[in-house]
Image: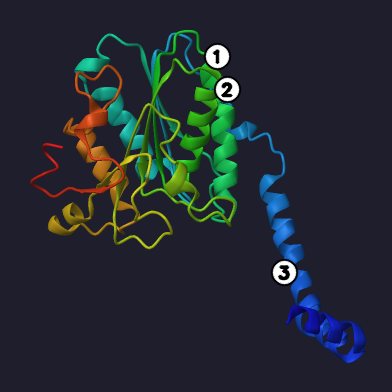
Amino acid sequence: MMHKLLTLYRKHSLIRWAWWLAVVIPGVPFVIISVGLIVYMHWPRGYQEVINFTLQDKTQYLTLSAHGVKDTPSSWSDHLQETMSKVTLPQLNGLQQEHISLSWQPYSNNPLTCSVAGKKIGAKLGKTINKLPNILAVHLIGHSCGAFVIYGLCQELKSINKSIHIQTTYLDPVSIYSGIFWQYGINNFGSCADFSDSYIDTEDTVPGSNQVIKNSFTFDVTEIRKEKKYTYAPHNWPPHFYVGAYKKKIIPIYFNSSENLQNKFQSNTLIKLTMESDAKF
């Protein structure tokens, strides 16, 4: 069949013209735009205005949170880091702590390019954090496209210093990377960390934000929002849930934990939380 079509194509100029007019010419702008977008997304940038902040050399335990697309730290990240600085957890007693609420605008504003930019920003931050002479552990938290910031940071940090303990926490993370890899986050988030937990709302419609993350313990907090009749949009609810859960000291913290967290929860499955269960998970 294919041989016959090729023969007709070679013999009849009308068929060749029809092919070019119907398929090739209309497809050229699409290819040019797609290639141009990929080049733009991956074009080298310094991101200096985002990563230029000072860390304390004496820091042993660092927490960093990254907001999502078209968001700012004031919506939840600032509140979370303030909470983390005030809540006393037994396993962190005596450690010199530092808490960073990362603002990575304007690179977070474009849904098509934020995943690539976020991952690159994370890698640069990983190099910076690794230079801290006393660093023992980090806890990285990302919402929406901010998930790529903490994933890139985790990857870089582990690639150059495997002794650093890393916990990654994903809050309704966006899964699409570089505009074309739709399952990227679902398949990769949590893979570089010593322990990873995720919190999702299954009624969220953002691609990948409402599914089990294979390498992270995934908690479904949808019913808590509905039971308490909160008016948060599904995509915005998990960060607010996490702040509240941290205040109650009911979320898993990996570093120096007396529990074996890897065996406490079921992997690669959706763990549903309700108002009754959230106080004891």
| Residue type beneath disc 3 | Phe
Relative side of 251 to 195, left or right: left
Q: Name the residue under label 2.
A: 127
Residue 243 point in image, percent of width and height? 26, 38
Picture layout, residue 185 above or below residue 194: below
Q: What residue type is labelled 2?
A: Lys
Circle 3 residue: 30
Name the foreground residue: 281 vs 48: 281
Residue depicted at 54% across the width and 51% down the height? 109
| Mark 1 or mark 3, whichever is nearer to me | 3
Q: Residue 131 carries which label?
A: 1
Instruction: Give percent across and percent down for residue 208.
Output: 41, 55
Query: Who comes first in sequence, dot 2 or dot 3?
Result: 3
Q: Separation of disc 1 and disc 3 at Cα?
A: 44 Å
Question: Label 1 near label 2: C-beta < 8 Å?
Answer: yes
Q: What element carries label 3?
A: helix
**CB atoms at circles 1 and 3 under 8 Å apart?**
no
Quadrant housing the C terminus = top left
Secondary element at tag 1: loop
- The x and y percentages for residue 57 are 48, 10
Q: Residue at x 73, y 64 (%)?
A: 33
Q: Position of residue 15 (x, y in %)?
A: 84, 88
